[in-house]
Image (spheres, grey):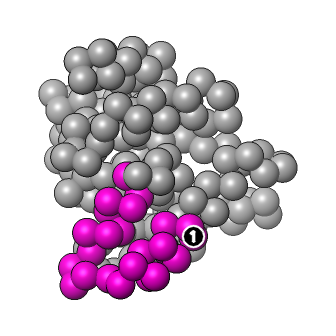
Amino acid sequence: MARIPGLLQTETYARTLIGGHCPPLDEETVEERVAARLERQSLLTRRPLAALNFVLYEAALRGPHVDKEQLLHILEQGRRGILTVQVLPFHRANPTSLTGPMVLLETRDHERLALSEGQSVSQLTDDPGVVSSHTERLSMIRAVALSPAESARFIERMVEAL
């Protein structure tokens, strides 16, 4: 299932996802995890700023727990100029783009890492072959996704329709 990345989640959306865990979590654990997720969002304001780029599949934006507040939050983050958001509409998706979430990272020392996420397992690796494969896949996805400006207009239309 497609979802909004943690760095772009509102507290309400994060609480809904974490609180809906199976098997259920106790309230204290939910609170701890929500607080940790929101704390990680300090990456968006810390110095030096990190360059962040997100490609969101339309399914994530139309998810059952995505509300107007969440969509406006994504727009606001994009407008702050510290990150870019691109939307991959349903009609532009290809098999390459639908193989699951991934994250590409580059450290201050220019070490490149790839994070692959699955339902119950995540893998962080610096293996050059995996990093290269993820980089190529991301390039293909970004080539067919809407531009940041088109993406903002796409999300704005979604907000208006709510």
Q: Position of residue 133 (x, y in %)?
A: 41, 58
Q: Which residue is mark 1?
A: 36
Q: Is residue 30 magenta?
A: yes
Q: Quadrant of the C terminus?
A: top left
Badge 1 marks a residue whose secondary structure is helix
Q: Specify the principal SS of the magenta part.
A: helix
Q: Quadrant of the N terminus?
A: bottom left
Q: Residue at x 41, y 58 (%)?
A: 14
Q: Quadrant of residue 26?
A: bottom left
Q: Quadrant of residue 110?
A: bottom right
Q: Is residue 120 magenta?
A: no
Per the rendered image, the range of residues in magenta is 13-36
Kind of residue at badge 1:
Ala
Looking at the image, residue 45 lies above or below residue 133: above
**Is 76 placed left or right of 18 in the picture?**
right
Q: Residue furthest front?
A: 27
Q: Residue at x 47, y 53 (%)?
A: 11
Q: Residue at x 17, y 32 (%)?
A: 90
